[in-house]
Image (cartoon, rainbow, N blue to C red):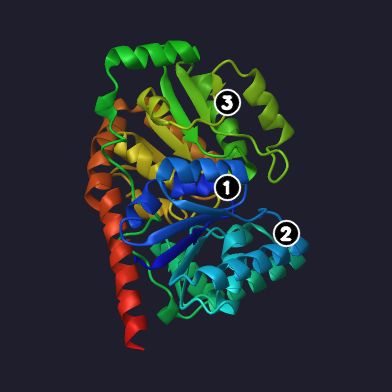
Amino acid sequence: MPKKLIRITTIPLSLEKLLEGQLSYMNQHYQVTAVSAEKDRLEKYGRENGVKTFWVEMTRAITPLMDIKAVWKLYNYFKKETPLIVHTHTPKAGIVGMLAAKLAGVPLRLHTVAGLPLMETTGKKRKLLDFVEKLTYRLATKVYPNSRGLKEIILKEGFADDKKLKVLGKGSSNGIDTAYFDPSAFSKKDKMKIRRDLNIPDEDLVFIYIGRLVSEKGINELVAAFKRLQQNIPDISLLLVGPFEEELDPLSEESMQSIEDHPKIYTTGYQADVRPYFAVSNVLAFPSYREGFPNVVMQAGAMGLASIVSNINGCNEIIVEGKNGMIIPVKDEGALFNVMELIAQNEDYRLRLASNSREEICKYYEREEFWQILLKEYKSLEQEYIKL
């Protein structure tokens, strides 16, 4: 009978996107259960991926009463199931899952850090989030920052000791499926049709952003820089692929108005398959304020795009300045404008960056290799536990 592995994320979207395919792979070696909120969507994920599921109500906001209920529900579930490993992702799932696992006596309690939202907060809220982060790491037996830069931040902030931290491979939480993200899957005819369906002119250079349309992703700066640039270079477009989040981190009114009114800014909403949008684009513009190890930058590289990213951990590990993209300071609209202008005006340079992009991703971030690295880590921890 295979040993039990329980994987927890706050919402099923993280299972679907951030950990795509990973739980099904691990299910060949362990009896895997996926735990998350949003019962119907979670159960659909379980059916499609061939893994067991267990529903627990969680939110990404600060909700103490609901969180205590979630801990209690998970504690009882762990006592009944007696898993060998509980592995959490995302901040809320981390504190809830690690606390319940510790109380239930789960031997291997693992937490992956894929970003630190607290870095953009201040005051009492920051102190509370710092405390929760430290407690999560203390409750875990091992913590996996998904980038080298994130590990350095964790050490600098004093959240955990070096001996508890480990970056798997070259970084990432799941690598990337380069056979799936392959530009050769789209013919010239396909691309022309996709552009026409979006009403993007055939001759335009397209800057693309994929992700949540929120302030902390640098969308206000991106929209402002693009508007300025488009006045000087008319044959460019901005394609924004992703959902708005008006409750948690809304864009400025000016940005929202521009997105709605500007004839060369296109939006698609959330898309399950982002490849067609990469296929008709030329440059990824990703001026985020904070990341763990961003999938979208790996995806863009695999699809053969040059990238403009902010100088933050993860982004500045995937992108090598002047090789497969360009790196700008965080929250710097002027720098973003200058780099977008440089790339728009220098086709040879852009094509050189793009030509290196896929090779870099295939070399370092192939998805199945990452799964094998993680499985090896699980087995190593298992052997250490058996020896105790």
Dot 2 lies on which element? loop
- Determine if residue 131 is in view: yes
Quarter residue 350 falls in: top left
Most extreme residue toward the front is 1
Q: Is residue 284 depicted above or below 42 in this figure?
A: above
Q: Residue at x 66, y 67 (%)?
A: 71
- Disc marking residue 331: 1
- Disc marking residue 62: 2
Label 3 or label 1, whichever comes before in sequence order: 3
Is 45 or 205 nearer to us in this picture?
45
Q: Is residue 204 depicted above or below 384 in this figure?
A: above
Q: Nearer the viewer, mark 1 or mark 2?
A: 2
Dot 1 lies on which element? loop
Judged left or right of residue 54, residue 247 is right
Q: Residue at x 49, y 34 (%)?
A: 209
Is 27 or 339 nearer to us in this picture?
27
Dot 3 lies on which element? helix
- Disc marking residue 227: 3
**Cβ–Cβ under 8 Å for marks 3 and 1:** no
Judged left or right of residue 81, residue 366 is left
